[in-house]
Amino acid sequence: MHFSAPLLILLIALTIALIAVFVIRPQTTATAAGKIAAFIGVKHCVAMCNGTIALEIATRALDLKGEVIVPSYTFIATAHALQWQEITPIFADIDPTTHNLDPQSVRRMITPRTTGIIGVHLWGRAAPVRELQAIADEHGLHLMFDASHGFGCTLDGKLLGSFGQCEVFSFHATKFFNTFEGGAVVTNDDALAEKMRLMRNFGFSGYDNVIYPGTNGKLTEIAAAMGLTNLESLDEFVAVNRKNYQCYRRGVAALRGLNILEFNQSERNNYQYIVLEVSPGCSVSRDRIIEVLHAENILARKYFWPGCHNMEPYRSYYPHAGLVLPNTGLVAERVVVLPTGTAMREEDIEMITSVLRSLTTSSK
Ligand SMILES: Cc1ncc(COP(=O)(O)O)c(C=O)c1O
């Protein structure tokens, strides 16, 4: 029997896919989870289908209820994961220099209905972990972190993932470490990990035995296989991101009113986000910069504009929230996130910074 080359390739791919699904199926996700836990240095990594479901399962497993304090300056999933379970997200303001939660604002948001705090390590720069832990301890609140941006980043030399009661990662394709779609909750708490494993798999404890109301939050085997491959290249990804980051910083250094957000060089960073801040004194507005970059087919984006509190349903629930979130408003109006990653060449970045240069020098 003769097979044409494309048919042969198709048959080989199909065989590999079948082996992946039916033979190595029980191992791939567990292996990836084990490697992630070992990499971070935590006891458990409960792998999930995405970061949003991981947030929902973590908050449910912690038994959060009533009100939970979160930043408004984050991706909408941080708030929606709570709202989806009829837990009220209460938005606290950020520190305009770090873009992370301002502990004083968190204190002001505490009420008798507050049960927890979710800190977000925005851009991979650690949230004020110690201060938030002190507040949580003082008020008997749960504390967990949305570490979606923080894979491979440290605080005081310790990888993000082991702070609070648990931390949540997103492994979405846009993230530093990706599994196409995926996520995980990491924790050192045995009972919490067990509860989340049940929740992620319909509440099954062994065959035919459901002991808990659960959902389907499992990471697929093929996504786990992607994760295993990417875990091997983390150092390479950091090196490329860092080179891109330095190239952007050089290109923007002399441009008045523009600044690339800095990373603490005494910590490990993944340099995943190139965050350009457009100061109010800049000769060109943030929105004009986005408009011109888009016209040049450069995929720059506003992040996390206009803030969760300005999106539905929160905008309708709290129409005056902006009054207590002044720094969120300021930062959301200033930020542009620039393209990076392994597909970017130095000349691409130089072209982008030259567009920025021409914009800031021409619009007097
Ligand atoms: C801060 C933050 N939280 C949560 C998520 C949600 O993760 P996912 O897209 O994997 O559901 C994301 C990213 O998408 C994020 O950036």
Image: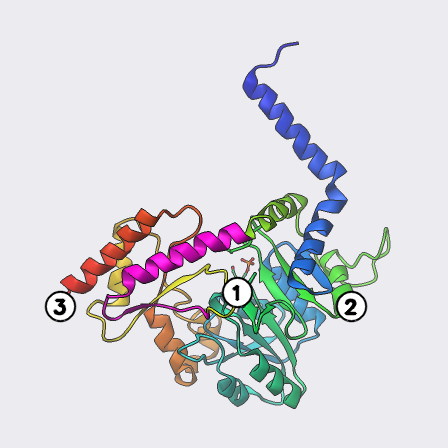
| Front tag of 1 and 3 | 1
Residue 162, horizontal then vertical, whole percent: 65, 70
Residue type at numbered disc 2: Asp
Residue type at numbered disc 1: Arg
**In this rendering, would 48 be left or right of 149?**
right
Say what secondary structure mark 3 lies in. Answer: loop
Q: Is residue 174 visible?
A: no
Whether 227 is drawn above or below 46: the answer is: above
Residue 330 or 339: which is nearer the viewer? Answer: 339
Which residue is tagged 1? 268
Extent of the magenta region: 235-264
Residue 198, horizontal then vertical, whole percent: 77, 60
Which residue is tagged 2? 190
Quadrant occupied by the N terminus: top right
Kindly identify which numbered label has been placed on residue 364. 3
Circle 1 Cα neighbour tier, 10 Å, few/some/many (<14 / 14–19 / ≥20): many
Q: CA distance from mark 1 to mark 3?
A: 39 Å
Which callout, 2 or 1, points at the residue further toward the start of the chain? Answer: 2
Residue type at numbered disc 3: Lys
Say what secondary structure mark 2 lies in. Answer: helix
Q: Residue at x 55, y 20 (%)?
A: 6
Q: CA distance from mark 3 to mark 2?
A: 60 Å
